[in-house]
Image (tube, rainbow, N blue to C red):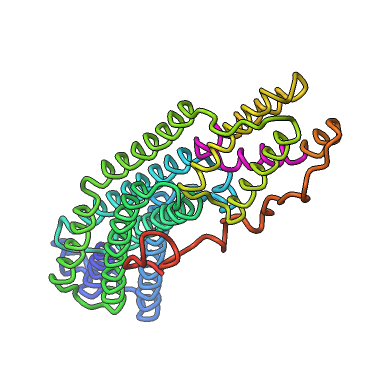
Amino acid sequence: MKRTFVIFMGLFLLTACGGRATTNTAVPTLLPTAALTTDVDATVVAAVAATATTQAGIDMAIETAVSATATALPTPLPVETTEYVTMTEEELAALIDTAVSEAIAATESTAAEVSSATSDTAVTTTEVQTITVYVSGAEEAIALAEEAIDAYYALYGDLAAEAVAELSAIEAELATLNENVATINETLVTINDTLNAGLTLAEDTITQLETAAATALATVDGYQAQVDAWQQQVATAVSARQQSLDMMQPVNVAADLPATLTQVQSYANTMASAFADGTVSQAEMQMLLQAGVDSAASLQANGGPAMQSVAQNITTLNKQLASGQFTQAQTSLAGLQAQLPDLAASAGITLPGAGITLPSGDNLPSGSNLPSGSNRPGGNLPGRP
């Protein structure tokens, strides 16, 4: 714009001064006034057109830069809420670890862009637009991490008290990080409004942006190690349950086949009741694992060759339960419930009651059924609805 203006002024002065700038003694041929006016007008029009073209190019460059920035940013992939219930406890813990890692990376990228933009003690509209793209990415990553944590609370919150306590601390840090990013965004809005109004940006406002970014960086410092440690804690808890199951011995072996089938039916009904809310508590876990060991031992003792596969199915079901593979365990349980009537009929036995059916998909803790706020373990944390 400045270059165009200088060119225009040069043309104007040159035209206004005629031939006085030259040492040539020849008398210049003067153009008619009408022709001179037309020439100047054409020059002005050309200058304006060139300026408009230049500005359009600048606008296009801004849009291209912001678009390229958005494309370059890693976009966290959202997880369908119905997929959470298909994950094992360790898989969901790994997802939380990954989601938090993405939130940390997005926040660090945002802070880096802020640092780059303010390094010359000034912030341009283009820089505001670029940082805003990074802020949006950080907000999305944080939201996905929060959603995954909610799913863990819903599915496994009653099972591992220590893991839940540590996860609550992780969630509190995530809420703080969310507030930090929101502060960056609010400052960007203020800066953008100031620039759009054609006003000079106050130094204090730039300092506020730098401070907000620095605070966000301080929040994520050491955060990844905290989440990694929690994931390892979950893996250790799952391994401990598996080892406890391996060491369990039967304490109640049925005396005959009718008692055995009644025992197996009771085991299946008890597990179905435990899964009615989509999760299993620690007390329910211990009771079910022992009942499964007893039922398998009774089938081995009284079921004969035809029922040994059922005993093995119960053993597999118990291992799935101990491993936090709740969806797989419910599938195995449904298969066991379907087998029981035929087993009883083949033995000439009528089992009491029709049994308890597993909850339907609508009753599983997914989507809108996931707890939030004070309704989930960990309490009503700040910055969360």
Residue 72 placement (x, y as % from top left): 41, 45
In this rendering, the count of numbered labels is 0
Q: Is the N terminus in the top left, top right, bottom left or bottom right quadrant?
A: bottom left
- Asked if one can make out residue 132 in the rendered structure from this viewpoint, the answer is yes
Residue sitting nearer the eye, 184 or 272: 272
Q: Position of residue 191 (x, y in %)?
A: 26, 71
Q: Nearer the viewer, residue 312 or 1?
A: 312
Was residue 251 drawn as part of the magenta stretch in this picture?
A: no
Q: Nearer the viewer, residue 204 or 323?
A: 323
Query: Which residue lies at the image location 72% right of the left edge and 30% below the top edge?
Result: 256
Describe residue 27's horizontal placement relative to residue 304 as left or right. left
The magenta segment: 318-338
Per the picture, the main secondary structure of the magenta-coloured stretch is helix
Please name the residue shown 68% across and 30% down the image.
255
Which sits in the foreground, 294 or 314?
294
**Residue drawn 56% across the image and 42% down it:** 326
Q: Is residue 98 above or below residue 19?
A: above
Q: Is residue 285 left or right of residue 161?
A: right
Q: Is residue 308 above or below residue 180?
A: above
Residue at (86%, 34%) from the top-left corner?
Answer: 348
Q: Is residue 378 left or right of residue 289?
A: left
